[in-house]
C-alpha cells in the first residue's frame, strides 16, 4: 500500500493534488518575512542562488510574486520529481539534475543541469538549489558552491517552516506543512564565492552554518518567538 501511494503521488495527478494542497497551506496561513518586506519585493532583484535544505523547500514558491519564480533544480526521479511537478503546476520553472553529480555527466544529469543553471544565471535570473546532497542531511555539498564560483552570482541562504508541521521519518527530516499556520520565511546575508583557487570546503562550511542559523530562526518564530 505504501509503495502504491508513493507511485500515485509521483504521477501527474498526485503531483497536481499536492500543488493544490500547497496553495491551500499558503492561502490559509499568515506569512511572516525576515527581514521584513512590506512591499513584497523579495525575488525582484538579483540574480541570486537561493539555497535551502532538502525537505524544507515545499512552500518556497509561496515567497515569490507570481511569474517571478526562480528556476528550481530537482532530481529527475523519486520525491524530487514529485515536488518538482507539484511546484511546476504553480508556475515554477524546473531544471532536472542531481547535485551529487554536478561536475560529471552521469545519467543523473548533473553536468547538463549545471550548464542550464549557469545559462539562467548569466541571463540575470535567479535559481533555487538544495544545498545538501542525498543521504547527507544539512551539510552543504560542493554543487551550490561550484555554480556560485562559475557564475559569480551570490548564494542567499533561505529557510522556511510553519507553526503547524509534521517532521517525517526520512533522511532529510522532510517537513509536512499544515494549513492555518504561521508561514515563516527567513533569508540570510548573501555569500560570495570568488573565482579563484580558494578551497571550496571553506564556503561549504560557511553555507552550512548560515543555513542552520536561518532555519533555527524560522523555527523560533514559528514556535512563538519574537518576530
Image: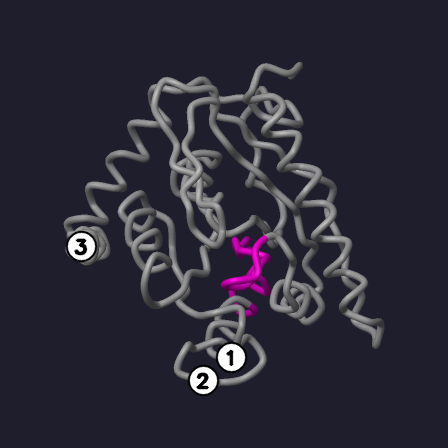
Spatial CA span between label 1 and label 2: 8 Å
Which labelled disc corresponds to residue 111?
1
Spatial CA span between label 1 and label 3: 26 Å
**The residue tagged with tag 1: helix, strand or loop?**
helix
Residue 146, image x and y in percent?
66, 70
- Mark 3 neighbour density, 10 Å: few (under 14) some (14–19) many (20 or more): some
* Residue 188 is one of the magenta-drawn residues: no
User: Mark 1 vs mark 3: which is more N-terminal?
Assistant: 3
> Is the C-beta separation of discs 1 and 2 under 8 Å?
yes
**Horizontal arrangement in the rendering, residue 216 relative to residue 108 (left or right):** right
**Horizontal arrangement in the rendering, residue 17 relative to residue 73 (left or right):** left
Span colored in magenta = 118-137
- Mark 1 neighbour density, 10 Å: few (under 14) some (14–19) many (20 or more): some
Q: Residue at x 50, y 32 (%)?
A: 161
Which of the 4 image quadrants contains residue 74? Answer: bottom left
**The residue tagged with tag 3: helix, strand or loop?**
helix
Which residue is under mark 3? 12
Amino acid at each position: 500500500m505504501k509503495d502504491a501511494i508513493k507511485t500515485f503521488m509521483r504521477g501527474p495527478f498526485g503531483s497536481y493534488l499536492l500543488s493544490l494542497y500547497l496553495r491551500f497551506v499558503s492561502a490559509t496561513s499568515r506569512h511572516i518575512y525576515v527581514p521584513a518586506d512590506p512591499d513584497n519585493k523579495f525575488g525582484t532583484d538579483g540574480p541570486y542562488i537561493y539555497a535551502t535544505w532538502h525537505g524544507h523547500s515545499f512552500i518556497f514558491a509561496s515567497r515569490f510574486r507570481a511569474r517571478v519564480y526562480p528556476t528550481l533544480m530537482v532530481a529527475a526521479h523519486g520525491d524530487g520529481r514529485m515536488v518538482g511537478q507539484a511546484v511546476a503546476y504553480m508556475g515554477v520553472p524546473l531544471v532536472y539534475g542531481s547535485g551529487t553529480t554536478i561536475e560529471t555527466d552521469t545519467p543523473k544529469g548533473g553536468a547538463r543541469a549545471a550548464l542550464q543553471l549557469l545559462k539562467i544565471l548569466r541571463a540575470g535570473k535567479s535559481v533555487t538549489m538544495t544545498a545538501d546532497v542525498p543521504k547527507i542531511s544539512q551539510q552543504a555539498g560542493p554543487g551550490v558552491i561550484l555554480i556560485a564560483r562559475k557564475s559569480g552570482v551570490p548564494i542567499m541562504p533561505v529557510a522556511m517552516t510553519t507553526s503547524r508541521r509534521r517532521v517525517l521519518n526520512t533522511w532529510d527530516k522532510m517537513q509536512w506543512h499544515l494549513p492555518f499556520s504561521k508561514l515563516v520565511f527567513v533569508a540570510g546575508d548573501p555569500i560570495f564565492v570568488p573565482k579563484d583557487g580558494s578551497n571550496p570546503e571553506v564556503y561549504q562550511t560557511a553555507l552550512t552554518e548560515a543555513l542552520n542559523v536561518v532555519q533555527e530562526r524560522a523555527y523560533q518564530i514559528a514556535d512563538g518567538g519574537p518576530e
